[in-house]
Image: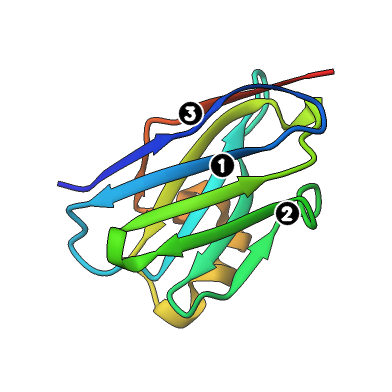
Amino acid sequence: QVQLVESGGGSVQAGGSLRLSCAGSGYPETPNCMAWFRQAPGKEREEVAIIDSDGSTSYADSVKGRFTISKDNAKNTLYLEMNSLKPEDTAMYYCAAEWAGISTLCMVTIQALGASALDAWGQGTLVTVSS
């Protein structure tokens, strides 16, 4: 059974930093892509960052230059380094994994289909940024 467990959320002031982690286990196959999504109250879940098996990354325009996605394959852990945080970054942050699709297309598939393209999700970790 796949398990994704996020940690590292918390409350910070605007301009601060946080590092989220996501420990994964039980994958039926090695994920093609891993991703971070977020969902603010009253809003849809939105893509934040994606990393594929080769280490290529993509980011939402709203976080480019401030957030960095990375992974440690040996530890089966995904990270999201968040700097220069803004109040609008306040949300529940979820990590997710995709393994059922075509590996070379996972990033464009997630960008096109959003949350429905992912095969497993964590329970989320809350990030609150105050002004």
Q: Which mark sits nearer the N-terminus, 2 or 3?
A: 2
- Compare residues 86 and 49 and report the one nearer the observer: 86
Q: Which mark sits nearer the N-terminus, 3 or 1?
A: 1
- Cβ atoms at labels 3 and 1 below 8 Å apart: no
Residue sitting at x 48%, y 38% = 94
Whole-percent x, y for residue 115 in the image: 51, 47
For residue 59, side relative to residue 122 (left or right): right
The colour style of the image is rainbow
Q: Is residue 73 above or below residue 117?
A: below
Q: Is residue 14 above or below residue 41?
A: below
Q: Which mark sits nearer the N-terminus, 2 or 1?
A: 1
- Classed neighbour count for the residue bearing mark 2: other residues with Cα under 10 Å, few (<14), some (14–19), many (≥20): some
For residue 34, side relative to residue 66 (left or right): left
- Cβ atoms at labels 2 and 1 below 8 Å apart: no
Give the residue type at disc 2: Ala
Distance CA(mark 3)–CA(mark 1): 11 Å
- Compare residues 102 and 90 and report the one nearer the observer: 90
Q: Which residue is mark 2?
A: 60
Residue 19, numbered circle: 1
Q: Which residue is mark 3?
A: 125
